[in-house]
Image: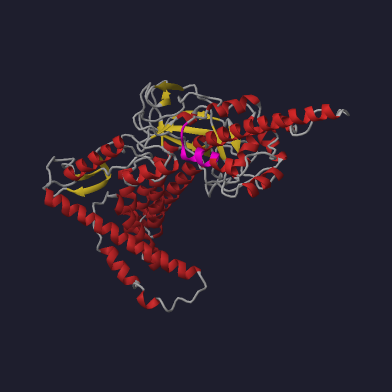
Amino acid sequence: MRRTTAQKCRRPKQLGLPISRPGSSNSSNSNNNSSNSNNSNSNNNQNSSSTDVSSVRIEHTAQRGYILCARRPFAAGETVAVEAPLLYLPRQRKVSPAGRAFRRRFRKLDPIHWTSYEIFRAQSTSVREAVLDLYCPMQSRFTRRLAKTLRRCGGLSGLDANTNNGKNHNNSNNNNNSTSNNTTSSSSNNNDSSSNNNSNEEEFLQCVTALHFNQFSSNPVRPDGSGPLTQGCRAVYRTLCRANHSCAPNCFARTSSVSAAQDVPPPRVIRAVKPILAGEELTISYHLQLEDSSSARRKYLLSTKEFLCECSRCGSSWDDTRRFACCRCFGGYHLAAAAATPPATTTTTTTAAAAAAAAASQKQMLSPCMQCGCALSSPECRRQLRIEAEVQQKLAYINSVLEWRASLDASDDEGSGCNDSDEDPEDLRSILASLRLHPHHHLTLKIAELQRQFATHDNDTAALVHALRLLAACHVAIVPWDLVSASRFESLGEVLEGAGLLQEAAAAHRKCLRMMCVLQDPGEPYPRHAADSLIRVLSRQGVSDMVAADR
């Protein structure tokens, strides 16, 4: 193996679980040809002047491996670091001959693995070594499946990823006329071929594993903010990939869209979303749905990134997304005990620990009120949790009916025989209207989203405004600094503007702009679009005030 130390493995030591880097392994199945590889080679080898990582440093810890720390204090909304890609993986639309052979031989593997390896092999030696430095020799499910498939299907023999400058090591190096010399040369070349194949397979495993656990999506936004400029592009960064995950991150990572062009790999930008002290660890989020419950977040990260999250939110005894109103004080709430998530590898010790945690959770059930400190009785705790379970069950039923109806609408099959047992849409609305939880409970987001869908279908502006207000308030209470939170206020502002409620619309757009300017540079498309929306509403409000004064 190229690297034999486990220092790249950022994980709690007692868990023995690998910590991965953010990425989008399920990107579009794309392939490349030699000309595209040469283009990406020139792009990846350029020295971008946009890189500035002088304010951060990489540190090594005994428990968690490498982490990214701040060299100086940062205020909220300040840019922490900017870095051009070490390796840029654009979406490839043409399939190379080796890519077609890889697809035929390894039908269970994503062809993008070979595409990435071809681009990797086209890079300079220094870039390839830097990418392989990110490889961690961990016992991940991803690497085991990859190695098992390679062994079962005959390895990479016969596939050429332009290794060693495109030379074919399967051929003889000389054509001597002597039979004995030919035999000796053939035997020697066969040994060299076997050795090279083994070396290439090992390099392939290390490369694909490093990319899988370290890559980011790299799709800048169009200048007008109408959508992504590219699709399916990925990138690996030398320094910024050391940032660990947290469900309560102090930084926000985004692909820069300023001066974005098709032929230049865009840099990655990290901005502070809260005040950061000098020496403090810089964390970002690998998960887009931070408003989910702690058990849902941990299960997602365990299945996709292969680590058990132990951040300040997931490691807490209480789940901050499961809130229950306090009956003694106004504004207070109780938190439900965090559900125990089993680790990836089950042992006697971990099973006992999980059982102990589950038993403790069952005893505590709900926390004391976070405001007045009063504790609920055990019967009241059980009643609150029973209501939560009933709401979750009814939401699952409504979603299943809606999905079944959508599948019927999308198909050409006659479904009249099943329509008699259909739930009437009015019945679904009445079920939805009966669901009541704390306004900042994560299930309230799902209730409000269904209300938004029904209101949009019915063209009911008042119901739509109510649903969007609930969505925005609930989301920002759970995840204060997040693009989704900003987009909630943007949608609310647009609906309020359409309804003629200009003062409330301006307030919603102002909140959206404030969030956008913290998450991204004000010159980025999204903050500019938010500013334009606010200016438009304020101008309309000014005209309305003038008309009212004239009247």
User: Which residue corresponds to the image point at 44% horizontal and 39% vertical from the top-left?
Assistant: 305
Above or below, 114 relative to 13: below
Residue 29 located within the stretch drawn in magenta? no
Give residue 281's position: percent from left, percent from top.
38, 26
- Observer-nearest of 106 and 66: 106
Q: Main secondary structure of the magenta part?
A: helix
User: Which residue corresponds to the image point at 37% horizontal and 44% vertical from the top-left?
Assistant: 299
Give residue 386's position: percent from left, percent from top.
20, 55
- Observer-nearest of 77 and 497: 77
User: Which residue corresponds to the image point at 26% horizontal and 43% vertical from the top-left?
Assistant: 338
- Image quarter in which the C terminus is found: bottom left
Looking at the rendering, which quadrant does residue 312 occupy? top left
Task: Write down the region rendered in magenta.
Answer: 138-147
Looking at this rendering, what residue extends furthest in the right direction? 177
- Observer-nearest of 420 and 335: 420
User: Which residue corresponds to the image point at 44% horizontal and 66% vertical from the top-left?
Assistant: 406
Give residue 425's position: percent from left, percent from top.
35, 71
Give residue 253's position: percent from left, percent from top.
46, 36
